[in-house]
Amino acid sequence: MALYAGVIYPATVGWCLVLLVVAIATLVRVRLHPILEWVVTGMWIVTGIQAIAVVIALLSGNDAGIVLTVGYLLATVAVLPLLGIGRLGAPDAAAADPDPNRPVLAPDQIARVDAGAAAIVAVTAAVLAWRIAVLLGAA
Amino acid sequence: MRQQRRIGPSAIHPIGRILLIVAYAVLGLAATGRSVVQITTKLDQAPLPYLVSGASALLYVVIALALWRGWRRVAIAGTVIELVGVLVVGTLGYVAPELWPDETVWTGYGSAYGWVPLALPIIALVVLLRRGAASADAHAAEAS
């Protein structure tokens, strides 16, 4: 639990902050999109480590409600696929979809969609991490 | 009026549309989780707030689906209902607090969610209606 409270939780929230800052920067300067992609990859890794740590904390006899804690953990994982959602608007991907209403995005639009989605996910993931930490008694 | 009926989802700004889908999907996930726990575990303690939470969750999912599938009218109707709901529930929370033994997603005009439930329908309506109006003008110009 000390590891979670002292390292995992602060690192998760810190990475969410990095993601938010890089996302906002990418909205302003689309050239930063490759950096955002690296940060997004890091977000997947950080979330994976967080998930393992939460499961270990629950299995080690924490008093936190399992349903709520696992629910928040699942929500944390569920929002991750929204990162990089702009790729669905790439011409190749849109051409493979019979839906005529599917938007086809230019490269700068893909960067901005990715950035906007990353900002939303960063805030959401930080809030979810905080709620999990409260339930585990680590915050 | 006929020309407005022709306006499809492609008339919605693509970036705005996708980001609205993301925002409503996240809010729908949060509200659904919250309301499912509340309704299944303690509905008898505060039926009105928990049912309102459930209705808001359903509404968020419907709006996200409507934006995704390009059902523009459903999306507009949903966001109008959402905005009215936030304003009514938020106001009733201050005017008649005895009706609300517990909080809903819309309590305090969505303050527990960073006022996103209040801001989001306004942003969505701006995106949906401005683009629609611009497209209607374009259709009118083409027709004349």
Image (cartoon, coloured by chain):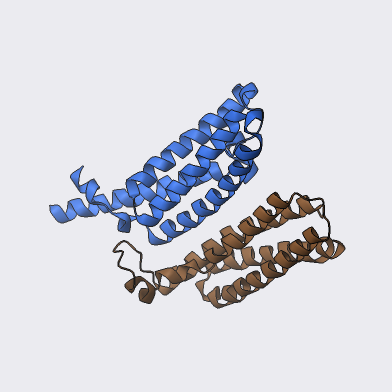
Chain colours: A brown, B blue
Q: Give percent across and percent down for residue A26.
A: 55, 69
Which residue: 47% across, 38% down? B83
Q: Give percent across and percent down for residue A88.
A: 43, 69
Q: Is residue A39 left or right of residue B3?
A: right
Q: Is residue B45 left or right of residue A118?
A: right
Q: Is residue A87 visible?
A: yes
Q: Give percent across and percent down for residue B11.
A: 31, 56
Q: Give percent across and percent down for residue B88.
A: 52, 29
Image label count:
0
Q: Is residue B114 visible?
A: no
Say if B104 sits above or below A138 in the image: above
- In which quarter of the view is residue A54 placed? bottom right
Which residue: 43% across, 61% down? B15
Which residue: 76% across, 50% down? A135
In which quadrant is the N terminus of chain B drawn? top left
Residue closer to the observer: A127 or A70: A70
Extreme residue toward the left, this view = B144
- In which quarter of the view is residue A37 placed? bottom right
Which residue: 58% across, 66% down? A23
Say if A16 sits above or below B134 in the image: below
Extreme residue toward the right, this view = A2
